[in-house]
Amino acid sequence: MPEEIEIKPCPFCGSTQVHMRDMATFPYVFCEQCNAYGPSMETKEEAILMWNKANGVNADLLATCELAVTYIEDGAPQTAADRLRKAIAKVGDQEASE
Ligand SMILES: [Zn+2]
């Protein structure tokens, strides 16, 4: 048996109540807490990897968004816009390098 890949907590709500679904056809990761789900893939391993990757990207984006909100509240919307633009470009780079 290959080693089990760990499924990371839900990137949207942080829940650890995440499980595999449709194991017999195209498996995907499903969050019991907020009904979020990852992409359907050909294997369970791929589905978990995609879910875990989305997790990392979203955590990054979330942190940037939170930062941007504090900049806007402090009266520096231009700085907020710059930060967000960089974060968006970073996600684009990650998708392009697949
Ligand atoms: Zn969730």
Image (cartoon, rainbow, N blue to C red):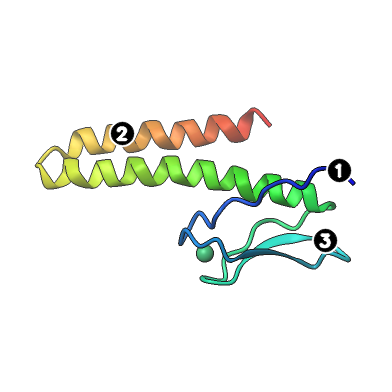
- Quick check: 56 left or right of 5? left
Mark 1–mark 3 Cα distance, whole angstroms, equals: 19 Å
Which residue is located at x 64 percent, y 27 percent? 97
* Amino acid type, mark 2: Arg
Question: Where 23 falls versus 67 (above or below)?
Answer: below
CA distance for labels 2 and 3: 37 Å
Is the C-beta of the residue carrying label 2 under 8 Å from the nearest atom of ligand 1? no
- Which residue is disc 2 drawn over? 83
Please state the horizontal and vertical placement of residue 74, each as a whole percent of the image: 10, 42
How far apart marks 2 and 1 lie (CA) works out to 41 Å
Three-letter amino acid code at the position of disc 1 = Pro
Q: Which residue is mark 3?
A: 26
Q: Residue at x 19, y 35 (%)?
A: 78
Instruction: Determine the residue positioned at 60% across, 42% down.
Output: 53
Between tags 2 and 1, which lies in front?
1
Residue 87, position in %: x, y? 41, 35
Under tag 1, what secondary structure? Answer: loop
Q: Nearer the viewer, residue 26 or 86?
A: 26
Residue, disc 1: 2
Q: Residue at x 62, y 31 (%)?
A: 96
Looking at the image, is mark 2 or mark 3 earlier in the sequence? 3
Rendered image quadrant of residue 36: bottom right
